[in-house]
Image (cartoon, coloured by chain):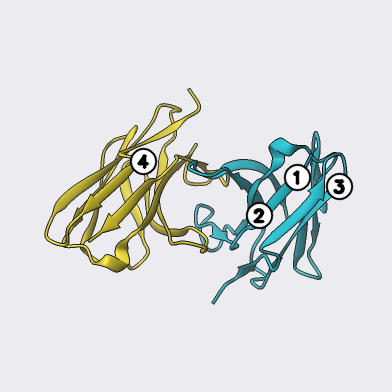
Amino acid sequence: DQQVKQNSPSLSVQEGRISILNCDYTNSMFDYFLWYKKYPAEGPTFLISISSIKDKNEDGRFTVFLNKSAKHLSLHIVPSQPGDSAVYFCAATSRSTGANNLFFGTGTRLTVIP
Amino acid sequence: DTEVTQTPKHLVMGMTNKKSLKCEQHMGHRAMYWYKQKAKKPPELMFVYSYEKLSINESVPSRFSPECPNSSLLNLHLHALQPEDSALYLCASSQDPASYEQYFGPGTRLTVT
């Protein structure tokens, strides 16, 4: 049973506009969330994370929002650039399940159109 | 050095072969992981090594045998695999077992014929 879900397999956005990638989870014990970016033929690269004690974390063009009551998080990329085109994975974990046991979503392929 | 390296990049093996996948990191990380990723699926955790000791084995069949010779190296020994074991095998490391952020290698694409 998939505990972390990314319901949009793909997303296309014009360069300079905002990209919003969504992620839902079912396990209320998750207390830490991460976003990874993956280019073809490369491993996932850590992008940004958020603890459940926060509802927002920002790093440059990337912002992650967490809505614990809805068990939903989103990644905003502003402005989107062609180099952002990749597959984005959401992941979740908790101290109770073992901090190093990451549960991944199935990924969203982002295409930024120049 | 902020890189996790994996060799080989690609591997084709028969069901009776014995082969090994290798992973290396020089970031001083004390936790290392093996994941398996099938096409269009998320990575799934196989094994976790904490301070060179196996701490998690996610019910992986014994035809997969991990080994951590030292804090920088992680091997995955393969024997008598099945075609359904064909997948991308990812290695990752984190600063310690309590660290959330994991750093991934590029993976080994394994095909079992």
Whether residue A39 sits left or right of residue B97 in the image: it is right
| Residue A83 position (above or below residue A113) | above
Q: Amino acid at mark 1?
A: Val
What residue do we see at 66% from left, 63% from top? Answer: A9
Callout 4 amino acid: Tyr
Tell me the residue at 76%/59% (across/down). A73
Determine crowd level at label 4: few under 14, some 14-19, many 20+ residues with C-alpha closer than 10 A: some
Query: Is residue A76 shown left or right of residue B81?
Result: right
Is B26 drawn above or below residue A68 in the view shown?
Answer: above
How far separated are the C-alphas under marks 3 and 4?
Answer: 42 Å
User: Mark 1 — residue?
Assistant: A112
Mark 1 Cα-neighbour bin, 10 Å: few <14, some 14–19, many ≥20? many
Residue ID at (88%, 44%) = A17
Label 3: chain letter = A
For disc 3, the marked residue is A18
Q: Color of chain A here?
A: cyan
Q: CA distance from mark 3 to mark 2?
A: 15 Å
Q: Which corner quadrant of the image does residue B14 belong to? A: bottom left
Q: Nearer the viewer, mark 3 or mark 4?
A: 3
**Residue B51 - label:** 4
SS assignment at label 4: loop
Amino acid type, residue under disc 2 in the picture: Arg
